[in-house]
Image (cartoon, coloured by chain):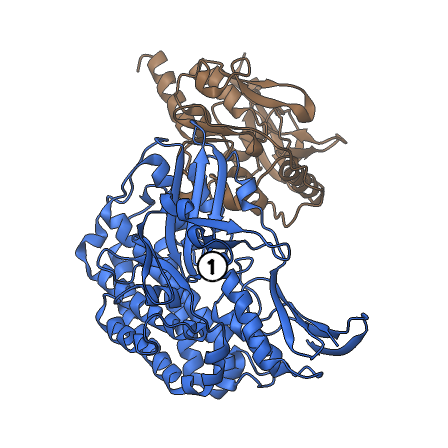
Chain colours: A blue, B brown
């Protein structure tokens, strides 16, 4: 008898999503859909606003990664202004972006996913949260909280506010760095290193326990998109885009933000408000690809900082070519954090960081502009068109999570087929289906939400509409 | 006329004060460190009593009076704060917030806005009326400035400073009631108007309605006190000092 299983909402995610599983007559999962149930409308209501308001306006999309939107938006504005920002401003922005990546990754890994990894996928949902983690492994919990605070505090020092800092503006940043703040940031670095070391060592110890999950959590060959630096190293802020295929062969390289539309399209499915970007030459859905920590590490040849280089070399041993398993997003996220701390240390150790020339000014010199940055969850593109007065006519945002949409849907199906079996729903089965989504750390509405505390109801419904089984979690 | 006849004595909030006959209650209260909230009033401009935030109670009068245009009288007893006044002031602010689109978080004046500050100082916690959410124009045709009618509260400071201080009278008010709009010249785009580009209107605008192009939030403080300095200097030059 065929059935429909709905997981709504999916817990421990940023935003609201729903998973629907359909089973066939044999009771096997035959179809799976990951649905994003909200529409935001930012592209529409920004129309008519002066373009230089866009970074502040767009940053309001998300309380977790406002910096990524600030950056991509400011860069799109700078394309409209046709300016190159002062080098110190570029360095300060790079530091802010890494602080953002660290705090967001700490949230994803420690608060949202470590409960599954430490306590097990089948643990009681009452304990399967950050408080449960702190109870069982206080050191790990403390390291997670401290790493998030490290990133947030740097954002607050530079941008005056932890959430929605207004410091990044078209042309650079509003204020130069004070030496006292630089010193405070540098003083926090040793503790951050110790915390990420602890987390990386712990992850490597327990990763083997999840071999089966690693094999079935969106583990398939596919393309990866991400930013790389001039030297093929990791880059989050001012690099160019590269797309590789499942074997690691470069499909597109040195792509500028303005060329994104030439190579990538966005498909729409009737069941979700989230779009499905794809690589045009391969079409949809064959041209779907993944972005984010796993993609970045698969694309770059090396990290470019000493400690992260060692970790990345080890990471690349996981597969002969690009690492295909999405479970390894977790591992890649920790390497991102380590790289971020090293970049922040390098930037604030450079005496030119106190330079006071941090903003370029210009009016409207082009009527169209695009900007790209690596958000914690992957490549983020803002594309704007303005009139001659600089008022917004049109905007399009290609969000990182959208680019993982197809992979998440495939991952949900793969995981459900492996773990959801029989007539009776068991919590651990469905938690694995949610956990595959969590590996991608999607930002659905792009705002933070409660962890593991949302009510969750799953129903098994027969083809005649009769509910066969219900599981409820409050 | 003797000096003695020019002086009035009155009571504000229980304090005995004296004032010149041509002074307003607002002036006298502020001279005596009694705070009355204002929005359309600005030192250096004529008063129009439009925003009604400076309403006060006068003993013997059932109605409330705007203190910025209320002249002192001998023996007056004035109250500047009471539950009734607080209720009225909060309601006025709520109506201002509900009338157009005041979205502080993404406004260019965030952190430097008199409407926002008054909301905080008057203890406004929420707006009880439904927001009207009108679709109003943003005019960025001027080389240096932008007018966003979504943030305009029709205080007419821009109209007064342009006419009274700059002497250009580019700004005026068009329409009536809720359809009123500040306009430049005969409702021409600001960039095509007879604007002298002095920027006084931007400096005196209490909200994000008038702003410098490309400046947002912390990079956009305003300095309306330039007006009193300017007047002191003009006065001095008239007197040949």
* Viewer-proximal residue among B230 and A446: A446
* Viewer-proximal residue among B15 and A458: A458
Q: Horizontal placement of B225 versus A436: left or right?
A: left
Q: Chain of mark 1?
A: A
A278 up-or-down from B190: above or below: below
What residue sits right under mark 1 in the picture? A288
Quarter of the image that includes the C terminus of chain B = top left
Q: Residue at x 26, y 57 (%)?
A: A229
Whether residue A236 can be seen here:
no
* Viewer-proximal residue among B219 and A43: A43
Q: Horizontal placement of A431 versus A463: left or right?
A: left
- Residue A294 screen position, x and y as percent: 39, 68
Q: Residue at x 68, y 81 (%)?
A: A425
- Residue A439 screen position, x and y as percent: 48, 71
Quarter of the image that includes the N terminus of chain B = top right
A60 up-or-down from B24: above or below: below
Q: Residue at x 65, y 78 (%)?
A: A28
Whether residue A413 can be seen here:
yes
B85 up-or-down from A353: above or below: above
- Residue A311 screen position, x and y as percent: 28, 76
B194 up-or-down from B134: above or below: above
- Residue B156 screen position, x and y as percent: 56, 24
């Amino acid at each position: 008898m065929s059935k429909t299983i709905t997981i709504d909402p999916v817990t421990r995610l940023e935003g609201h999503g729903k998973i629907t599983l359909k089973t066939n007559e044999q009771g096997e999962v035959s179809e799976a859909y990951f649905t994003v149930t909200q529409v935001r409308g930012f592209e529409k209501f920004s129309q008519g606003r002066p373009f230089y308001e866009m970074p502040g306006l767009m940053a309001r999309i998300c309380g977790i990664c406002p910096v990524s939107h600030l950056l991509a938006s400011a860069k799109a504005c700078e394309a409209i202004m046709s300016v190159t920002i002062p080098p110190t401003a570029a360095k300060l922005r790079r530091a802010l972006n890494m602080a953002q990546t660290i705090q967001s990754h700490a949230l994803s890994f420690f608060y949202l996913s470590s409960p599954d990894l430490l306590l097990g996928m089948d643990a009681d949902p009452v304990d399967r949260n950050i408080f449960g983690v702190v109870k069982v492994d206080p050191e790990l919990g403390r390291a997670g909280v401290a790493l998030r605070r490290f990133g947030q505090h740097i954002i607050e020092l530079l941008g005056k506010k932890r959430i929605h800092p207004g410091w990044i503006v078209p042309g650079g940043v509003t204020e130069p760095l004070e030496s006292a703040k630089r010193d405070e940031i540098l003083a926090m670095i040793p503790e951050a290193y110790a915390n990420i070391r602890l987390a990386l060592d712990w992850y490597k110890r327990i990763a083997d326990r999840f071999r089966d999950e690693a094999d079935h959590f969106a583990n398939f060959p596919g393309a990866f998109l991400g930013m790389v630096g001039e030297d093929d190293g990791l880059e989050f802020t001012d690099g160019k885009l590269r797309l590789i295929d499942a074997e690691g062969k470069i499909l597109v390289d040195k792509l500028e933000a303005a060329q994104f539309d030439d190579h990538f399209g966005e498909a729409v499915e009737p069941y979700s408000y989230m779009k499905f970007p794809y690589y045009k030459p391969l079409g949809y859905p064959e041209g779907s690809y993944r972005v984010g920590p796993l993609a970045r590490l698969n694309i770059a040849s090396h990290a470019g900082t000493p400690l992260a280089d060692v970790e990345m070399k080890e990471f690349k041993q996981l597969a002969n070519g690009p690492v295909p398993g999405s479970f390894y997003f977790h591992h890649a996220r920790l390497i991102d954090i380590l790289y971020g701390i090293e970049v922040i240390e390098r930037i604030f150790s450079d005496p030119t960081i106190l330079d006071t020339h941090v903003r370029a000014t210009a009016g409207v010199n082009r009527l169209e502009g695009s900007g790209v940055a690596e958000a914690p969850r992957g490549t983020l593109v803002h594309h704007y068109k303005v009139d001659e007065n600089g008022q917004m006519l049109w905007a399009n945002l290609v969000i990182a999570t959208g680019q993982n949409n197809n992979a998440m849907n495939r991952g949900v199906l793969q995981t459900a087929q492996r773990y959801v079996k029989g007539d009776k729903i068991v919590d651990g089965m469905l938690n694995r289906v949610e956990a595959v989504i969590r590996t991608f750390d999607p930002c659905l509405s792009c705002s933070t939400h409660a962890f593991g505390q949302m009510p969750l109801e799953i129903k098994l419904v027969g083809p005649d509409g009769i509910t066969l089984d219900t599981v409820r979690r409050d | 006329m003797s000096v003695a006849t020019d002086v009035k004595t009155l009571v504000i909030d229980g304090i005995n004060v004296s004032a010149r006959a041509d002074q307003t209650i607002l002036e006298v209260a502020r001279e005596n460190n009694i705070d009355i909230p204002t929005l359309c009033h600005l030192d250096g401009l004529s008063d129009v009593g439009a925003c009604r935030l400076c309403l006060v109670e006068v003993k013997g009068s059932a109605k409330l009076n705007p203190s910025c245009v209320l002249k002192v009288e001998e023996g007056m007893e004035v109250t500047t704060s009471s539950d009734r006044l607080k209720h009225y002031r909060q309601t006025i602010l709520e109506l201002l917030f509900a009338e157009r689109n005041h979205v502080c978080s993404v406004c260019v004046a965030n952190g430097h806005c008199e409407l926002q500050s008054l909301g905080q100082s008057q203890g406004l916690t929420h707006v009880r009326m439904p927001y009207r959410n009108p679709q109003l124009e943003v005019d960025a045709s001027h080389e240096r400035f932008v007018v966003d009618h979504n943030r305009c509260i029709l205080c007419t400071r821009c109209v007064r400073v342009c006419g009274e201080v700059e002497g250009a009278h580019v700004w005026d008010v068009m329409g009536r009631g809720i359809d009123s709009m500040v306009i430049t010249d005969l409702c021409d785009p600001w960039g095509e108007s007879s604007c002298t580009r002095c920027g006084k209107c931007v400096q005196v605008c209490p909200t994000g309605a008038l702003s410098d192009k490309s400046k947002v939030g912390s990079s956009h403080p305003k300095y309306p006190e330039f007006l009193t300095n300017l007047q002191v200097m003009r006065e001095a030059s008239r007197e040949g000092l």
